[in-house]
Amino acid sequence: MNVRGAPLSRWLARPTGGLGAAADVYMHMACRTRRACRRFVRASAAVAVFAACAALLAPHAQAAAPPSPVCQPLAADPTVSQFSRTLPVKPKRIVVLEFMFAEDLAALGITPAGMADPAYYPVWIGYDDARLARVPDVGTRQEPSLEAIAAAKPDLILGVGLRHAPIFDALSRIAPTVLFKYSPNYVEDGRQVTQFDWARAILRTIGCLTGRERDAQALNARVDAGIARNAQRIAAAGRDGERVAWLQELGLPDRYWAFTGNSAPAGIARALGLDPWPGEPTREGTVYVTSEDLLKQPDLAVLFVSASAPGVPLDAKLDSQIWRFVPARRAGRVALVERNIWGFGGPMSALRLADEITARLLALPKASAPAPR
């Protein structure tokens, strides 16, 4: 499916140019006459033979470096909803209005000039807290302060279209601004695109905006390696294909967020070889559920993310008449995940999510085989 002119898969993995075009030009220049062309061909053959011999004599030569990432115009980026027409080449003072962007900058080795809700970042994300501890507060993610943003003297502002589209013009008057789409909700090549795919693409775009394309590429490769490692652990334990739910406690009586089919936890679960529940996508990647919704899921493993301070036991959180009859609880297949892990974060949060999903699932008993009829 095409989104803003380019499928996400092409945006995530665009080919880069090699030496072919340069060689064509060189050959065209060398072959001005038939005689010159014969000399060029003989010389090229000699060079090719020499290169082949050199390769045979150097078995321990280093592998070629990965191709340089290619940065495309923001108009072709499916994750971007709005952007200023003039942007700095390598911004030095960046204000971020969403946790994911603060995490991404920290992962790229950049300290923001200002960020929204800095007091809550350690509670939900917790990646590189030391770097972000003294970043100026520019208000909340829902209602950032234009005065505080201006006081930070940014040369770039990063926000989310879902929240910040109404103030895009005001933000742009302060500094060049880029707003990202909140969440994907479409299928490409028969596969549901998820917030995990989105987070990886956004990191790449931020890498391009800051001149740190290779760093972003290396971070995404690190995430790939971590997920592959965890997927191997799950497969080796015979647990691939299991159904799993990532439930977020909300501090409400028997009311939770279940992360849906287009969420980051769902995308990570699929990459690990698991079957996330519920599989249907939603606008924000979550849906409200109660313990009653879990009564009809006999083979489900539930990973329950706490919203309270550490130390509150799982039994205290599931103390209700209905929870006692939920198949996952009766089978001992509910695991407590302490807070400080965020289902809407960037690739570093995704790597932690993959580690948590793997560790918690493997600590639970396997689903019982269905009784024969």
Image (cartoon, helix red, strand yellow):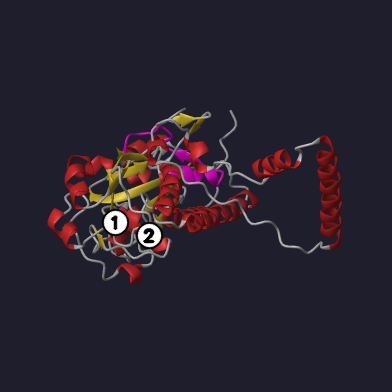
Q: Is residue 223 left or right of residue 45?
A: left
Q: Is residue 161 left or right of residue 20?
A: left
Reading the image, the residue beneath label 2 is: 105
Q: Name the residue at 39% across, 38% down.
A: 260
CA distance for labels 1 and 2: 26 Å
Q: Residues within 10 Å of mark 2 (few under 14, many from 20)?
A: many
Q: Residues within 10 Å of mark 1 (few under 14, many from 20)?
A: some
Camera-side residue: 183 or 243?
183
The spot of residue 228 in percent (x, y) is 59, 52
Most distant residue in the left direction: 147
- What type is the residue that disc 1 sits on? Ala
The spot of residue 321 in percent (x, y) is 29, 45
- The segment highlighted magenta reads 266-286
Q: Name the residue at 43% across, 56% down.
A: 211
**In the picture, residue 295 is in which quadrant?**
top left
Q: Is residue 277 magenta?
A: yes
In the picture, the quarter occupied by the C terminus is: top right
Reading the image, the residue beneath label 1 is: 307
Camera-side residue: 239 or 48?
48
Q: Is residue 351 magenta?
A: no
Camera-side residue: 299 or 283?
283
Tell me the element at label 1: loop
Q: Name the residue at 82% across, 63% down.
A: 58
- What type is the residue that disc 2 sits on? Leu
Res. 245 in view:
no
Res. 102 in view:
yes
Q: Name the residue at 49% across, 40% down.
A: 11
Callout 1 touching callout 2 (CB < 8 Å): no
The spot of residue 99 in percent (x, y) is 31, 55
